Image: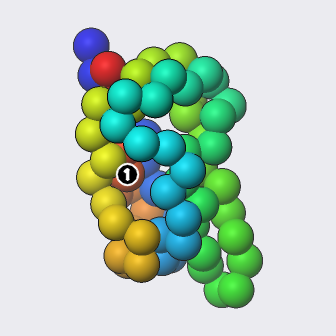
Amino acid sequence: MAKVISAHITGTVWKIEVKVGDQVDEGTVVVILESMKMEMPVEAEQDGVVEEILVTEGSSVKEGDPLVRLA
């Protein structure tokens, strides 16, 4: 069952820390968002394999937008 990791703040995708096929554990930083000159890491909430990256570096996201899908 796929799990989507979503943005917890509105901001800009500063850096994507994973690639498709990567194994991630709960707590692994998958994306770093920038908001108001602060870097905010987004962590996986469960173990899984990165199935799809739904954003690109530099793109704007709103709170709740999907970032990464885990298998």
Secondary structure of the residue carrying tag 1 is strand
Q: Is residue 46 visible?
A: no
* Residue 61, quarter of the rendered image: bottom left
* Residue 36, quarter of the rendered image: bottom right
Which residue is rendered at x = 37% and y = 51% of the image? 67
Is residue 66 rendered to the left or right of residue 57?
left
Label 1 sits on residue: 67
Is residue 42 rendered to the left or right of residue 3?
right
Is residue 50 rendered to the left or right of residue 32?
left
Quarter holding the N terminus?
top left
**Residue 20 against residue 62 in the figure, above or below:** above
**What amino acid type should be assigned to the residue bearing mark 1?**
Leu
**Residue 68 against residue 28 in the figure, above or below:** below
In front: 14, or 66? 14
For this orientation, the residue located farthest to the right is 38
**Residue 58 against residue 63 in the figure, above or below:** below
Which residue is rendered at x = 72% and y = 77% of the image? 38
Instruction: Rate crowding at label 1 as few (under 14), some (14 to 19) or many (20 or more) other CA atoms within 10 Å.
Output: many
Which residue is rendered at x = 50% and y = 57% of the image? 16
User: What is the x, y in percent for residue 14?
Assistant: 54, 72
* Residue 20, quarter of the rendered image: top left
For this orientation, the residue located farthest to the bottom is 37
